[in-house]
Image: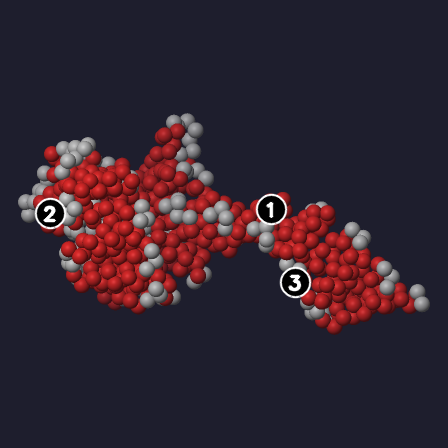
Amino acid sequence: MKIMYLSLFFILNCLLSYSQDSRYTVMGEALETGLIREQEAEYNYLMAKGFLSGYVKEAAEPLFAVAANIGHPIAQYYMGYYSDKKYGDEKSAEEWYLKSAIQGYAPAQFSLYVINLFKGTDQNMLYYEQEKIREKAVFWLMSALFNKDTQAIQQIDFMKHFVDEDVRRKATIDAFIFFRQQDDKGNSVLHRAVYFDNIDLVTYLLEENFNVDYCNKEGNTSLHLAKSVTVAELLLKNGGNLYAKNKYDETPIEWAKMKYIGSDTVANYYSYWINGFSSDPVDVEGNIISGIIYFNRKQYSKALPYFNKALTLDPSSGKALFYRGKTKNELSKYPEAIDDFTKIIRDNSSNTEAYYERAESWFNQSKYLKAIEDYNRVILLDSLAVKAYCKKGNTAVYTEQYDESVSAFSHALQIDKNNYEALLGTGVTYAWMGKDSAALAALEKAVIENPVCAQAYYNMGIIHSRNENIEEAELNLSITSIIDPSYNNVYKQLGIIRADLNKPKEALADYAKAIYYKPNDPELYEERAALFSKLNETDSVIRVYSKLIELKPEVAKYYNKRANKYWSKKDYSKSLADYSASIRLDPDISIYYYNRGGVYQKLMKTDLAIDDYTMAIKLDPEDHYAYYERSVSYEIKENYTKAIADIRKALEMDPENTKYSKFLNMLEDTQKENE
């Protein structure tokens, strides 16, 4: 009975802990005016939690059941837990966890990850069946990660041992897509990917059989929003309907003709798609379209002859000049590209596309101020040119005009508040300015708009890292590596972070990947050597420094480091050779002589040891260790006067050193005995 009263007291405390208004809402409306479903669910959930905390577990379960059946996600999670742990009913447990997980409750998502991960280890399954189950496991793990679940963060590396890279990437993107199906305009993920001309995401979504003809609130399909021939071609090859009409009774061709920069070319491509292509076009437009197709397939050398032929047929074709300039840009023929764009501008000084592409050419030659000048001309001609604002913002960062950069991105966001390029640029610029809170806010919005924006996650990871939010940094950098495994900068940063988290083996794996992409970066090898040393893997350390010496044979410190490891293995001949090499390359470093003196002492070459210790003292007169070791060498030669002088000098520098004082007493006693 006492327990019951305590439980009821706890429940009342829970309810009374709300504000007065909230308390009346829950207790007054719930008990007096009849419960609406959400309030009923919350009320039963709170009651159940109260009984659970008051150790009346039997009373909690039926209340959780009521709340769960109404749709309370946490109560559904508890019902899954009861089904699993109390009744051993895995099927019911999974059903309850699923109901909770799709509402975004992270513990339920993590539970589904665990269930599917173990299912995927069933050796009685066919391989492809295991892969499907593991993919599902990663889907739920990444869903939990996006909700910042701490258990999920700890599972990232464990999961990688069981699931292939491609499966991880697919499941990660699927998780993004699932939890952000539409925006407020009814645009699907595919609509947004097409609108932003995000070819990678479009390709992925089409491979996953995303509905090409799904309509937004204006009735537009993805084909209506295509801005490039590349994306248009992808949509058409996957069954896009060119005859679909929006609520304005316009087909994609009609919509394209009046909407976007370059959309007339998209409209022409649609027309050619309907009427058929020629392998050897004889007209100007046919050659331009053929060239664009090769251009968008990144076959630039094949594209160029078509544009040249179009210009032979019509030397005044601005469109042919424009695409030839773009092609020359891709072939790194920047001055020639600038010539083509300048010809267009000379004939039509209001051609925004030509200014924009010429700015790209200037940028590629690192002529940033000229690039900004051309982006400004685009903006002057078209105040709604979001892409030009974004490019100007990015370019201004290179000239350290950070305020100008933020201003450009701000203008872009005033035009299109959800533009992920502007959000990303804003975040990166604020990061350069050291305004980390503002940077994180912008970057978090960027990944909502573009779920495969590896650069945004990478920058969030860097910001968290420098603010010593190490676990957050690891999470964001891990997501970067899953979304884009070729994003090579991420592995070095992950290595640094995991070393700080005392995960040396994981860090070693990260540095190995970093070296794969940057095999001549000595810093990566140095970090690996430090980690191997921490793990007491001496032979591995020696191998790494041998590679460093191969890469940079002129660097003295690498020989010294390798010599230290040979010393620890008591391989004094190799140690001696390396210390000598370090001295030959950099004769002004005292520690190299000190170290070699130790080898000579081990080899009983006392005079040579004394010479090296003397040189170490000359280069660093405050090195009391060198005085001590030279004192030992003099003692071996029975030169007690010099030995005593050196140990006294060492004690002057380190008077608390008992080892030195004992050695001095021993020397003085020995000297007296020999007098």
Which of discs 2 and 3 lies nearer the camera? The answer is 3
Compute the Cα span from label 1 to label 3: 23 Å
Name the spot of residue 231 as percent of width and height, x first.
22, 42
- The numbered disc on residue 160 is none
User: Furthest residue to the right?
Assistant: 675
Compute the Cα span from label 1 to label 2: 63 Å
Q: Name the residue: 30% across, 68% down.
A: 403
In this rendering, position of residue 526 left or right of residue 614 = left
**Colouring convention used in this rendered image of the protein:** secondary structure
Contact? badges 1 and 2 (CB < 8 Å): no
* Front residue (pair 389, 41): 389
In this rendering, position of residue 5 left or right of residue 357 = right
> Where is mark 1, residue-wise?
546
> Where is mark 2, residue-wise?
257
Badge 3: residue crowd in 10 Å (few <14, some 14–19, many ≥20)? some
First-in-chain label (2 vs 3): 2
Q: Name the residue: 74% across, 56% down.
A: 598
The amino acid marked with disc number 3 is Asp
Badge 1: residue crowd in 10 Å (few <14, some 14–19, many ≥20)? some
Name the spot of residue 568 as percent of width and height, x first.
69, 50
In this rendering, position of residue 642 left or right of residue 168 = right
The amino acid marked with disc number 2 is Lys
Q: Name the residue: 43% across, 62% down.
A: 467
User: Furthest residue to the left?
Assistant: 249
> Where is mark 3, residue-wise?
588
